[in-house]
Image (spheres, helix red, strand yellow):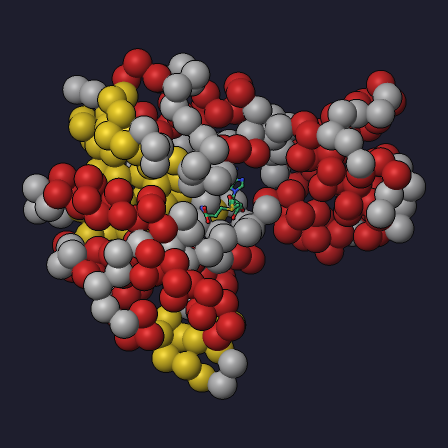
Amino acid sequence: MSPHQGSDAPRSDVESIEMRMLLEAVYQHYGYDFRKYARGSLRRRLWRRADAEGVKTISGLQERVLHNPLAMDALLMDLSVNVTAMFRDPTFYVALREKVVPILRTYPFIRIWNAGCSTGEEVYSIAILLQEEGLLERARVYATDINERVLERADHGVIPLERMRAFTQNYQRAGGRSAFSEYYKADRDQARIDRSLLENVVFAHHNLVSDKSFNEFHLIICRNVMIYFDKELQDQVHELFYESLVNLGILALGNKESIRFSSVASCYEELDPEEKIYRRSE
Ligand SMILES: C[S@@+](CC[C@H](N)C(=O)[O-])C[C@H]1O[C@@H](n2cnc3c(N)ncnc32)[C@H](O)[C@@H]1O
């Protein structure tokens, strides 16, 4: 491990300058804008990548990334943090079923945006819940992410069988109504998600930093994404979500995220404050 990885605070002014220059270079050359991501976690990830590339400074990493697109791919994988799980935080899905589903039921056609869907486990969970509630057929779920590589995996719908065993417990705790194994086919050490669950799911590239609103949704689920953004970027994305919700539409965030101190806090009511589920006021 690099001696730089221990703390989140920049070691020196020089390091801050190097970080700013690298992020600017990545933006100018590749169009990925990480300039307003939270500094502490960015710093750790940049040093991790610098170590993996065998370079001694952030400037060294900048040179590597600018001249080698494969190094950029690797950096993107590190910076976009793709950790996810099916029925992650099971109590969130209990709240979704009890408090959000009755509202969704009132719409003849339901549009949902799962922003920052990573490798798909979250959207598979949403689809299963909708299916069990008899709502999947009249729903369209847009699952988006900045990272094309994880989107391809999400669309593929194949998960190591071992992970499915852990997800089974989450599913049960989330109030699942069937046998979890009904939703996938085991094929040696892989599980193939039942394709019928994905018929109404559209996977698409969308960057929350630079892309605009693309529809009006009844429900937006964006969990464990904004935690990596600084306050200014969080406010910008909150405004994008506000614009993208129908009147009385619902916004669901991750455990460690909140609408509270954002620029749009007064435009929402709390539907389940514990589970960070909010409803746009009229
Ligand atoms: C930690 S994962 C969360 C996955 C899932 N929402 C969950 O809670 O399990 C964060 C995801 O946000 C995506 N992401 C990061 N920055 C983004 C951006 N600017 N626009 C869209 N997605 C982004 C990453 O690629 C990653 O897949």
Residue 10 sits in quarter: top right
Q: Position of residue 247 (x, y in %)?
A: 18, 26
Q: Is residue 9 left or right of residue 258?
A: right
Q: How many marks?
A: 0
> Would residue 207 be seen by someone viewing this image from the given angle?
no
Q: Which residue lies at the image location 49% right of the left edge and 53% below the top edge? A: 84
Q: Residue 267 or 180: which is nearer the viewer?
A: 180
Residue 115 sits in quarter: top left
* Quadrant of the frame with the C terminus: top left
> Would residue 121 be seen by someone viewing this image from the given angle?
yes
The outermost residue toward the bottom is 188
Above or below, comparing residue 60 to residue 257 in the picture: below
Above or below, comparing residue 187 to residue 53 in the picture: below
Q: Is residue 24 left or right of residue 158?
A: right
Q: Which residue lies at the image location 35% right of the left edge and 41% below the top edge? A: 221
Above or below, comparing residue 233 to residue 184 in the picture: above
Q: Position of residue 249 (x, y in %)?
A: 22, 32
Q: Position of residue 68 (x, y in %)?
A: 78, 51
Q: Which residue lies at the image location 68% right of the left edge and 52% below the top edge? A: 73
The outermost residue toward the right is 56
Q: Position of residue 206 (x, y in %)?
A: 45, 43
Q: Which residue lies at the image location 37% right of the left edge and 71% below the top edge? A: 193
